[in-house]
Amino acid sequence: MAKHGLRPYSYPEIVSSWQFMDYLLRHGRTYPHHSIVSTIKARQHGFNDCMDIEAMFDAIFARLQQERILPPA
């Protein structure tokens, strides 16, 4: 941390819950659990916006680097 001048945050201070990631990665499961996700119903109800996931992560990582939570690339 000192090498890059990072601020001293612990994981719980940055991420409030890992439950979604545990579910997504099937933590503790010994059998496959498939997820089928459709956006059709959301779009039928007027939620038509979309976001480029790569651009979103680039923005998140850039912000975390600006706030000195992650070291520069």
Image (cartoon, grey):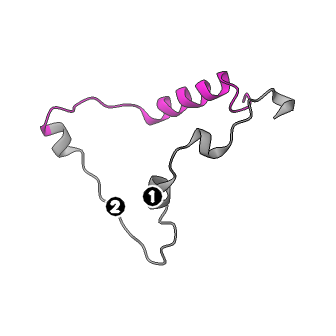
- When asked about the image quadrant of residue 6, the answer is top right
Query: Callout 2: few (<14), some (14-19), or many (20+) C-alpha neighbours within 10 Å?
Result: few
* Residue type of the residue flagged with mark 1: Leu
In terms of depth relative to the viewer, which is nearer, 2 or 25? 2
Q: x, y (%) of residue 44?
A: 12, 39
Residue behind mark 1: 24
Image vertical order of residue 34 relative to residue 13, above or below: below
Residue at the spot x=54%, y=30% of the render? 60
SS at mark 1? helix
Quarter the N terminus occupies = top right
Q: Is residue 36 left or right of residue 58?
A: left
Residue at the spot x=16%, y=45% of the render? 41
Q: x, y (%) of residue 45?
A: 13, 36
How far apart are the two marked residues, 2 and 1, measured between alpha carbons? 9 Å
- When asked about the image quadrant of residue 72, the answer is top right
Callouts 2 and 1 close, C-beta under 8 Å: yes
Residue at the spot x=21%, y=33% of the render? 47
Q: Is residue 32 left or right of residue 44?
A: right
* Residue type of the residue flagged with mark 2: Ser
Write down the region rendered in magenta. Answer: 44-73
Q: x, y (%) of residue 21?
A: 49, 54
Residue behind mark 2: 35
Query: Callout 1: few (<14), some (14-19), or many (20+) C-alpha neighbours within 10 Å?
Result: few
Numbered badge on residue 52:
none
Image vertical order of residue 4 relative to residue 41, above or below: above
